[in-house]
Image (cartoon, rainbow, N blue to C red):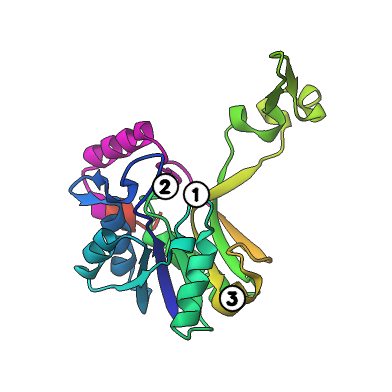
Amino acid sequence: MNIAFIPARGNSKTIKDKNLKKLGKITLLENSIIIAKQSNFFEKIVISSESDKILKIAKKYNVLTHKRKKYLSKDNSNVVDSAIDYLIKSKINTGILFLFQPTSPFVKKKHIKILLDKIAKSKYSSAQTITEVEHNNHSWNQRSISPTQEVSFLKKNRFKFYNKQLKPNYYVFGNLVAVNISKLIIKKNFFIKPSYGHIIEWPYNFDIDNYDQLTIARLLIKNIKNLNNFFNKTK
């Protein structure tokens, strides 16, 4: 069984009602639901939230809902606990679970298929999209600042490998992760080793965490003439 699990808190902090912000004509939440449904890869699509408003919207799309308890909806709550809570209550202990995040709105059908195939047909316990860290954000460029405003590099390698060409490629999370359900329940971790990494590029790695990023995402959608091709093209 393949499950699309979409967490959507109602009491988001960085952007008020973040998951209900419009991207084009639909909300970020609805965007994730539609991508999951149109992929045709999932037997179950589950919206997890403490918000009745969010769950009511989800039901319009004929998907399953998971009402979170308060302890699973705090600022420091881990979404993995909500996923496991749903699985245990639903008596599901096998299959593959995909974590869709509404704030990562540009997930391609191809991304889903690649991750699904890697877990279903290989040794991997999890599979994730990853994206290369830009040169200026590379860990060897990171700095700390003291109470007296004195700046220090965190990595001594910075002075030996001072330009982009000399630094090794580092990667961060992209937009999607899939995990073996039985191992997820035991390990309580989405990124269980061995974990396959599929490299994606901008704008598919775009994440919305503030109002500026929301504005950029809206501009992207506005200027993409063929949205169906954008999400479903194979290259």
Compared with 58, 90 (above or below) is: below
Query: Three-letter amino acid code at disc 2?
Result: Tyr
Residue 185's label in the rendered image is 3
Q: Quadrant of residue 16?
A: top left
Q: Position of residue 46 (x, y in %)?
A: 36, 71
In the displayed orientation, state which residue is furthest to the bottom: 91
Q: Is residue 145 above or below residue 110?
A: above
* 104 sits to left or right of 163: left
Queried whether the magenta region covers residue 95, the answer comes back as no
Query: Range of the magenta residues?
Result: 199-228
Per the image, label 1 sits on a secondary structure element best described as: loop
Residue sitting at the far front = 70
Verify CB contact (< 8 Å) between mark 1 and mark 2.
yes
The span from disc 3 to disc 1 (Cα, nearest Å) is: 28 Å
Crowding around mark 3 (Cα neighbors within 10 Å: few <14, some 14 to 19, many 20+) is many
Numbered disc 3: secondary structure = helix
Which of the numbered marks, if any, corresponds to residue 204? 2
